[in-house]
Amino acid sequence: MSLYDHRYDVFPQTRAVMRQRKWYNWRDNKFHSLVPPEQGLTGPIYTSIAYAFNTAQEAAEIFSGERSGYAYPRISRGSPTIDTLAQKLVELELEDRQLTSEYDALLTASGMSAITLVALTFADRGRSIVSSPYLYGGTYHLFEEFLPRLGIECIMIDDPCSLDSWRKGIAKAKHPALLYAEDDANPMLIKLNNEAIQELAHSHGLLYACDRTIGTPVLEKPLLAGTDIVVHSLSKNMGGHSHALGGAIIGRKRLVTQIRESYFPVMGPVMDARVADCILKGLETLEPRILQKVTNAKYVISLIKNHPRIKHIYGPGGDLFAFEINGTLEDARCVIESLELIVFAPHLGDIQTLAIHPASTTHSRIPKETREKLGITDTLIRVSIGLESPYDIAYDITSALNGLT
Ligand code: PLP
């Protein structure tokens, strides 16, 4: 019986915080006794990277993957701190407690390493990925340049909102294995229909993996509807305070184990326990942060949308939106440099409002012609809304736009 059990029928957010406290209850291993439940309000951080075995049999079983346990972070489950975060992510994505035992999460050093592992594991040996072209710049670059060098074909379809376009991509691919998309596609924030895409994938015997960094599990939980793999950059909203870089791959145990036992131990992009602890702290406030930021984003859009210098607004997708200005590349740069409250930074998902000019930063390595076809023009500015007053955020954007001659 936990200290908090009598409070279990309270608000959903409080329940989420209480689940976090399961740190003290759900593990039954030798570390447990080191932390008397009544003492700390936050859990300990297990920084050890090596764990002693009790018997040779136990060592052999952990190494072969027959038994779950700790040994060394690249080749086993990491540490109790890493495991606590992994368990928490599975619960956030699935909610339904009965299902959580069938799923697992693998934590990685960054979102990019999570995406690379998924691609390498499920499309190696000459297989193909069929992907939406609306991707974070790093992912686009991985798919367009680096994976083809390894013999992995990546087909970028024209329109991820059209199932016909996905079908054409599958038909064009030599050995299709994986469909891939960001479902709040960055930075144009095009919302995709995960259920329809995964049905199509499954009808062709393919897997569907989806980057859910932007929406977070607060806004949608596609694993519940049958998506095979969800990846996250935990560096964004999940951590939420720009204090920790990390990634996660969440899916059915069989698929996650395949990654854990193939490229993960040889590449070694492990997450540090201190980082996992920072992300755990961030997750405690995930739901209220996201809900407030989504409200703020809608409000800011309503306040700026009629400005004569704004040509078009994309989104909001979660707490993000992007706007195209009437003007030139120089004008866009001038607007972003004139912002006073909003921080000009290559990042999103913080509690502070951030802005970026994708054409000269996150998406600058995509050839201009392709970039413009994707709608990422020279005058597009992406905004990641924070928790400041929406009036102040809107005032900052409007003042910067008014400053254009
Ligand atoms: N996916 C999306 C949607 C992103 O925006 C980013 C980074 O901005 C990544 C993945 C990569 O994550 P990380 O920076 O943690 O490697």
Image: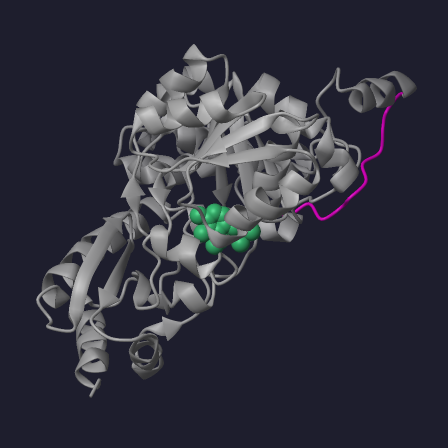
Give percent across and percent down for residue 89. 48, 35
Q: Is 45 above or below relative to 56?
A: below
Main secondary-structure element of the magenta-colored stretch? loop
Look at the image and say whether residue 48 sits in the magenta stretch: yes
Q: Which residues are magenta?
A: 44-55
Give percent across and percent down for residue 310. 17, 68
Give percent across and percent down for residue 121. 65, 28
Q: Is 354 above or below relative to 158?
A: below
Give percent across and percent down for residue 352. 35, 66
Is residue 1 found left or right of 59 in the rendered image? left
Q: How many marks?
A: 0
Is residue 229 found left or right of 383 in the rendered image? right
Name the image quarter holding residue 202: top left
| Quadrant of the drawing holding the C terminus | bottom left
Q: Is 114 above or below relative to 390?
A: above
Is residue 57 found left or right of 305 in the rendered image? right
Look at the image and say whether residue 271 sits in the magenta stretch: no
Q: Residue at x 40, y 73 (%)?
A: 344
